[in-house]
Structure formats: structure tokens, C-alpha cells
Amino acid sequence: MSAELHTAAGRGHAPATAPAVPPPPAPGPSRAGEVPPPTAVGQVAAAVGQASDRGARVAATAIALAWHSAIGLPAVLANRSELSNSGVVLAAWALVAVIGILAGARLLRNAPLPAWPLAGLLLAVDAMVFAAAGERQLFTTANWVWGTLGWFFVLALWGRRVVGLIALLAAHSLIALAAVVGYGATAPADLARFVMYVYGTSSLPIAAFAGSAVIAALAGERAAIAAATHAMAAERDAAERARRDRRERLALVGGAAGAVLAELADGRADPADPLVQRRAALAAARLRRLIAESDDVPDPLLHELRAAADLAERNGLPIDLVIIGTPPPLPVQVRRRLADPLTTTLADAREWARLTVVSGPDEVVVSLVTPDRDGPDTTGPPGDWADDSHGGRVDRLYERDGEIRWMQTRWRR
């Protein structure tokens, strides 16, 4: 296009002639049927997975502390006189309780834990309690590490591979086996009891640890599938609405162009009549903008305005197109409300025209200046106009003083 083109990318100030427009209200919630961005599906899956994982953390922390307090402590207090060193057993119980509270609090805040140092401390406590419980309390609830310590291993290694938990429970079993052998409890019944204790106190923590990870993964996967299905349905609905809307607009614009052509073909319209020329120019401008609207270009609004300016210049109108900044991505409806009033006025312009586009991250201002001339005012009465529907607020300002016509459309985020 040979029309004079001026650009100043990166500048976001509005023209000095632009009157102040009150800021629009904050945008409302997104409309049903809008297509989620590509990252939304992953975000939904992550949010659901995190919610499931947080519930499992709460459950694991509650089980560990409840078992430690409701079963382990009463048994220790009830059998203090029969423990070899009740002070060590109670001190170890208190230490593990503090560890459990701190670990649970950090887990609920999603803060990382020093897993292996914490696991090493728990194993040291394990060995101390087996040594301090004594032979008589080796297989009783007073030796609380049997049933409790596995759950604290779960808290320490939360979020890591289940192999680590199995390794810790295996170390715990070896410590228990050393105590069993050390106390001489090697009769078949004692060894069978040892095997049952190891199985009973290890299987539940492993099942809860692995099951929570699997459930969180499955929940995230199901959420991702549901979100992707919703996104596909919303995209289909949006495409169908866009196709239907475009077909209606094409029928409307084509009907106007067809009416002019039919009148010219039948001899009912005079090609030299300015009104006929204006109708033809307006129909051509609308058709050109409708075609440009569907083009896949980086800046659709600028592309549509350039198409309108190019058509005006082809009809013999000298036009200056000034572009300042780069428009942000805008819905089709917003682009129409920014461009349609100006392209309508541009189709009726004579002598010269100046089209200015000023863009920033949160605002786009499009203004048109043309000579004022006698004739019907096709843009409506001078003044302000606003539309808050279809993707955002667009304000329109229009003035004429007998010498120039000035129109401005403005979108603000």
C-alpha cells in the first residue's frame, strides 16, 4: 500500500486530541464457552493432584500422631515399672512426638523436609528404644517403636520414591532382629511373632505411602482429561458461534453489495450518483474488512485497518496511517467495535484522511480525522457511546465542527 505509514513501536501514549474517558469497570468473570489457554489443562491437573496429595498428608500426619499419642504413650506409662529404662523410652517418645509435629507442620505448608537426616535420627531412636525396653517388653505395646515409627518414616520421606521407605523399614526390621537375637528370643514362636510384627507394622505405611501417590496421580490425570474434554467442547462451541456469526455478517454485507450491484445492473442506479458511489464503497470496505478478519497474522487489528486504508486509497483517497505501539491480543468482537465505526466513516471520506492507532498493554485507541462536508451524518449523533459486551468495554467519541470530523474508539482492559 502506498499510503503514508508512520510507526513508533513501544510508545503507548494517546494522541493529544483524545478527550479523557472514565475508566471502565473491572472485567467480570470469563464467559461460559471460552476456550482455556493451553496451560490451563495442566494447571487444573496440578491443582487437583495437589489437593489430593494435601489430603493424604493430613491423613498420614493424623495417623502418626494419633497412634503415637493414643496407643504408644498410655502403654509406656502403664508399664513404666517393667521397662529396663523407662526414662529413655519416655524421652525418645517425646523426641519423636516433636519430630512428628514439626514434620507434619512443614508437610502441610508444602515445605521441604531434610528427609535423610530426619530418617537417620529416627533410626537412632529406634535402636535406643529397643535397648531400653528390655526383654520382657520386647513384643508389647510399651515398646512403641513397633507400631509407631513406620508412620514417622512416611512423614520423613513424603513425596519421595517408595523404595526409600522400604529401605528404612528394612533397617528398622534389622534393628528389631538384632534386639530379638540379643535378648535370646530365638524360639520358633518368638521368631514367628517377629515376622508377624514386621509384616503388620510395615504393610500399612507402605500401602498408605504408595497409595496416596497413585491416587494423587490418578486424580490429576482424570482432572486433565476432564479439562481437556471441556476445552475441546468449548473450542467447538466457540468455532461454531464464530462460523455462524461470520456467516450472518457475510450474508448482511453480501446482501448490501448485491443490492447495489443489482440496481446498477437493472439501470435503477446511476454510477455517477455520489450516494451510489458511497454505498458501493461502504459495501466494499465491509467485505474487505470481513475477509481480513479471518487472516492469520500477528496483529489482526492493524491488518484489518490496513486493509480498510488500502481500499480507501485504491478509491483515490490520500490517507496517512500512523501506528504507535503494538496492540495486545483482542477478541474478534472487540476488534469489530474498534474498527467498524471508523471504516464506515472512512468509506464516506473525501479529499484526505488520517488514521491513527495508539496501543499499549492495557489500552488501544483508534482515531480518524477527515474533512467535514455537507451531507447526512452516517455515524450517528456526535457524542459518547460505549459497549460493555462481547469481550470488554469499547468507548466511542465523535465530533464535527464544520471543518473536520473526528472519531475515536478506545478499548481499555
Image (cartoon, rainbow, N blue to C red):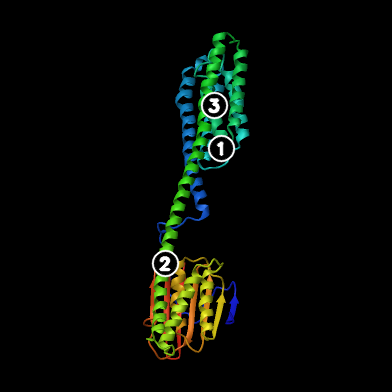
Confirm whether residue 203 shows in the render.
yes
Q: Which one is in front in this view, the residue at disc 3 or the one at disc 2?
A: 2
Q: Position of residue 203 (x, y in %)?
A: 52, 25
Q: Amino acid at mark 1?
A: Gly
- Along the line of sight, the residue nearer the viewer: 233 or 98: 233
Confirm whether residue 27 shows in the render.
no
Q: Amino acid at mark 3?
A: Leu
Q: Position of residue 267 (x, y in %)?
A: 39, 86
**How many C-alpha atoms fall within 10 Å of the one at disc 1: few (<14), some, or many (≥20)?**
some
Q: Mark 1 and mark 2 in contact (Cβ < 8 Å)?
A: no
Tell me: 126 left or right of 282: right
- Along the line of sight, the residue nearer the viewer: 378 or 215: 378
Q: Which one is in front in this view, the residue at disc 3 or the one at disc 1?
A: 1
Q: Residue at x 48, y 17 (%)?
A: 79
Rendered position, 259 above or below 360? below
Instruction: Kindly identify which residue carries mark 3.
Output: 149
Secondary structure type for disc 3: helix
Instruction: Kindly identify which residue carries mark 1.
Output: 159
Instruction: Kindly identify which residue carries mark 2.
Output: 247
